[in-house]
Image (cartoon, grey):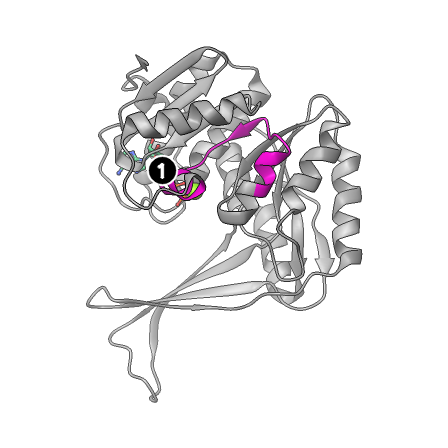
Amino acid sequence: MIVTVTMNPAIDKTVDIEALERGRLNRISHVELDAGGKGINVSKTISKLGGKSIATGFIAGNTGGIIRGVMNDWNIENDFIEVSGETRTNTKVFEKNGELTELNEPGPTVGEKDIHALLQKLEGYAGEKTLFVLAGSVPQGVEKDIYSRIIEFVHKKGAAVLLDADGELFTKALEAGPDIIKPNRAELEQYAGIDYIASEQEILSIAEKLMEKGIGTVAVSMGKNGAMFLKENHKIKCPGLKVKAHSTVGAGDAMVAALSYSWDEGMSFQDTVRTCMAVSAGAVTTIGTKPPSREVVDSLMEQVEIEEL
Ligand SMILES: Nc1ncnc2c1ncn2[C@@H]1O[C@H](COP(=O)(O)OP(=O)(O)OP(=O)(O)O)[C@@H](O)[C@H]1O
Ligand SMILES: [Mg+2]
């Protein structure tokens, strides 16, 4: 069973405008709404692959209701905690000339009682066959050690955790020993205190140090340059697949979905790696954060090249 946790979901609202004029009435020619947040995107991709997951986290107000509706439309089992306030709407204003202006709402403030309710819910799902996906940022009111707290208590029930976070959330969660992590290159550099573009050799040695800390699987995504995968004594590098890129936003989330789906299906390490590369490259070919179809993923799977490091 895969349980995705999105503590800070959002509605992504993309609007098209001829040319934005400050202090004037601006008419929108096209609006597109999409339920977003890393865990939610992961659940959608798992669903496209033919798998199942349960989506949980915090939602609030009318926008929270929209998120629940989208989850239902996608046939994704959802079990969110309702908190007071309003889930964020992040508006992206696209002008004809390609310029993008973003307006992001603060979202609700989550209280100690809400956090307790979520932890109780997670405890109910925790078991030896459960993988929790902890992905993305946390709302106001939630401490940066929340992921490490979750990892510690679900581990006691035999569950596994896949972590995809950055900054302090990532660093603190690492101390609790997540089972699978998927940092991108920049997140790993930030973690290691490197303020330049690290070489692949340096990336590999940071990943090796993380393995020594007791993390089972380390997948480092490197955008169009591909990814590195470390598990036990396997070290693999895959060059990026050659695809026509539409939007690279959410490619990392697609890889997290592939890692989760492979875990749930009990795939071998090599098959996991192939699935990760095909699903993430497939995600790049779609508009926005839309997941790729199963057919696209299956055909990309044949392109994956595996180099042992
Ligand atoms: N331009 C591209 N061409 C081919 N594959 C790509 C491209 N960009 C990304 N990918 C694939 O997607 C994977 C994840 O991409 P990336 O490293 O950008 O993740 P990320 O920064 O975590 O993304 P996000 O957090 O926005 O979802 C890469 O390892 C690669 O397999
Ligand atoms: Mg990412």
- Rendering quarter of residue 155: top right
- Furthest residue in direction left, as rendered: 97
Q: Which residue is mark 1?
A: 185
Q: Is residue 121 left or right of residue 255?
A: right
Q: Residue at x 49, y 27 (%)?
A: 210
Mark 1 CB in 8 Å range of ligand 1?
yes
Residue 27 at what x, y percent from top left? 34, 79
Magenta part of the protein: which range?
172-191
Q: Residue at x 40, y 46 (%)?
A: 289
- Furthest residue in direction bottom, as rendered: 23
- Rendering quarter of residue 122: top right
Q: Quadrant of the N terminus?
A: top right
- Is 206 rendered above or below residue 185? above
* Residue 181 is inside the magenta segment: yes
User: Could one spot residue 296 in this view of the protein?
Assistant: no
Residue 128 at what x, y percent from top left? 72, 21
Secondary structure beneath label 1 = helix
In front of the other: 260 or 76: 260
